[in-house]
Amino acid sequence: MHSVATVLFLVVLATAVATGARRWRIPAPSLLVVAGLVVGMLPGVPDVHVTPEVIGTVVLPPLLYASAEELSGRDLKAVWRPVTVLAVGLVLFSAAAVAAVAALLTPLPLSAAFVLGAVLASTDPVAVTALGRRLALPPRIQVLVQAESLFNDATSLVLFRVAVSVAAASGVVTWQAAGGQFVALAGGGGLAGLAVAGVVALIRRRTADPVLETVIALVTPYAAYVLAEAVQASGVTAVVVAGVVLGSSGHRLTTAPVRLQLHAVYGTVVFLLESVVFSLIGLELPSLIRALTDADRLWPVQAVVLAVVLMTVRMLWVFPLSAVLHRKHAAGTPSWRVAAVTSWAGTRGVMPLAAALSIPLATDGGAGFPQRGVILVLTTSVVVITLVAQGFTLAPLVRRSGVALEPAHTRREETEARHRVVLAGLRHLEQMADLEAVPDVLVARLRREMTTRLDLTRQLLDEDDPVESMAATYRQLRREVIAVEVAELRRLHDDHLISDTTRRRLQRSLDLEETRLADS
């Protein structure tokens, strides 16, 4: 019962804080971590201990899958070179830098310091996606930081397993063995993800039931993760590959009502899981600190230094890489703005916490794992520091750098696309009318509706201030009419003139139209 009560409390707390963060335009992960810290330091709050199985098996797969689904395969091909450099080279260098500094400043032996470096080496896809979702970054930057955080798992996981094996068994691992393990983890995870994506695609093509489609979508990331882990491959890589493949082809696998339902259900699941897991990060830190001894009282300074090391190393890699790529693809002086935003977006989050929690309690010889408690505290502290320091300052940096897409640019691109889509539909309608394949009255009705939409998009393209345009007036007027229709529908139902089934069907139709107005 205690565990159930804790989960329910976290759901309520996280939902309230995340709702406030959206209203105040504050990064939700950063505010959730702060809220968890505040609650964890209150007197009488019981210690919270999270098992790696809960985070790794229950929480991570759907969050990673949702992040991967947002990636465009076309955009991913455009940034694969810098993503590879960052996901492999930067991870290796970050791990070495953190290990060296930790061995000098902390009581960790070199083997345990290398474990800490491997844990903190990679950026976190859940945190990066959650922080960047509302920043209006250009597509190339958004894809770059998101893809890097998704694909650097294989590198950091191999490093982590090698480091743990050395620390726990005092064994010697050769570069050949580490390289083979990397290929097995990344390659095996990729194949497992492709296999699950292929099976799911076949099933979804033959399924039209929205409920069954929703269940399949929720089960898919878990199936990819479990299959990959069962064959000793990277479950995270499998989830990412399955998400990218199915995300690129999902619009061809389902119908419009199913897509609407999937979007609503997955949005709710991701919101709850993100809210709870970031609250847990803050909530667990006070209990980990209380378990330390007096000899470890310098942990705050050590955590700050390690966080600064990670940020500095990232800048030292991203700025030269940006200059090299700019020299290859454009002339002139490379922009520091893009490099600054890219380097500052490298937050840590759920993945390092899950890795640190999975460190074994004892070595193969039966002795306790060296300084495991210190590793957990430093890992969680660095995660909190990056989420708070970088999370709260990333949006101002994006605004000051000028790399964010202007709302007017985004609106115009969308309006031009709507205009061309409606024109294509009208051309097809005229062809159908010339063939006399459908009744003239239906053609005339649909032509009026599409012509109205075409006029609205023309008005948006012609006006300097689209907010006060005729299109906005039309949407407001249509919403008022829908509100009257909904009221009349309720009156008919209350007066027992229509059945509840009829009311629900008509209400759904009106809801879909109102949703289209909100998205237009």
Image: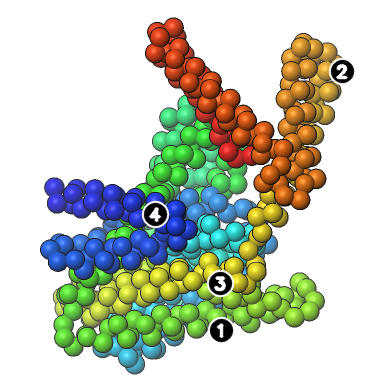
Q: CA distance from mark 2 to mark 1?
A: 64 Å
> Looking at the figure, which quarter contains the C terminus?
top right
Tell me where residue 435 appears, x and y as whole percent: 85, 16
Residue, x 26% and y 70% (percent of image)? 285
Numbered badge on residue 316 = 1
- First in sequence, mark 3 or 2: give its number: 3
**Furthest residue in direction top, as rendered:** 497
Residue, disc 3: 397
Residue, disc 2: 434
Residue 353 seen in this snapshot: yes
Q: CA distance from mark 4 to mark 1?
A: 36 Å
Residue, x 56% and y 25% (percent of image)? 482
Say which of marks 3 and 4 sits in front.
Answer: 4
Tell me where residue 215 appears, x and y as whole percent: 41, 36
Q: In terms of secondary structure, where does tag 4 sit?
A: helix
Tell me where residue 36 appears, x and y as whole percent: 29, 63
- Which of 189/139 is in front? 139
